[in-house]
Amino acid sequence: MELRLIETLRRINRGVAFAVGIGLLACAAFVLLDIVMRQIGDSLGGTEEIAGYAMALATSWGMSFTLLELGHVRIDLLRTRFQSFGKALFDVFSMIVMSGVIVMIAVKAWPVVDRSLTNGSRANTPLETPLALVQLPWFAGWVWFALMSCLVTLAALSLLVKGRFAETESFAGAFAEEETLQ
């Protein structure tokens, strides 16, 4: 059941990553168009602001994909010295810590969005973008990452309790450099 859940989450997050990639390509095309227009004496304006928003959204939404593809940086100096049970313990511990941090980020991000909604805040730029338009999807990305992190943690914990230590490595382990060299 746990591995099926992880595979489903991977499929969903690949779709999210694809959508984020399309958004980044659109942003790059927008910036390129602005650069070309500047060469002929005109400009769309606001490309720096829009690119910044795109990066914030790509970061918050891309974290879940990176988590499920074992792309987050981990220092596994101690972990590599243990057998499957010890490695599984380190994996579950790292996921518990990550989940705690990400849940805290998501919780602390809400007051930022709430303040923008309450005040009708706008960016202090020529575009005067309503900040809530950008902050709501940004916040949703952090909530999504927190949800994914907690689900991965629960799946890893479940496998640990069931004694299926080696299986946690495929979704909660550290992507070791030595494995890529072989």
Image (cartoon, grey):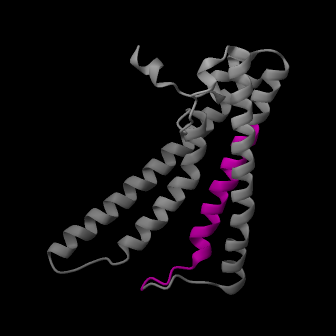
Which residues make up the magenta segment?
126-151
Q: Residue 127 in magenta? A: yes
Q: Position of residue 128 (x, y in %)?
A: 49, 84
Q: In this orientation, which residue lies closer to the viewer: 166 or 155?
A: 166
Dominant secondary structure, magenta: helix
Most distant residue in the right direction: 161
Q: Position of residue 104 (x, y in %)?
A: 74, 56
Q: Residue 85 in magenta? A: no
Identify the residue at horizontal 63%, vertical 55% (top origin).
Answer: 141
Q: In this orientation, which residue lies closer to the viewer: 19 or 109?
A: 109
Residue 148 drawn above or below residue 30: above
Image quadrant where residue 8 sits: top right
Q: Quadrant of the N terminus?
A: top right
Q: Quadrant of the C terminus?
A: top left
Identify the residue at horizontal 62%, vertical 74% (top origin).
Answer: 132
In the picture, measured across the screen, residue 87 lies left or right of residue 77, that is right
In the picture, measured across the screen, residue 91 lies left or right of residue 77, that is right
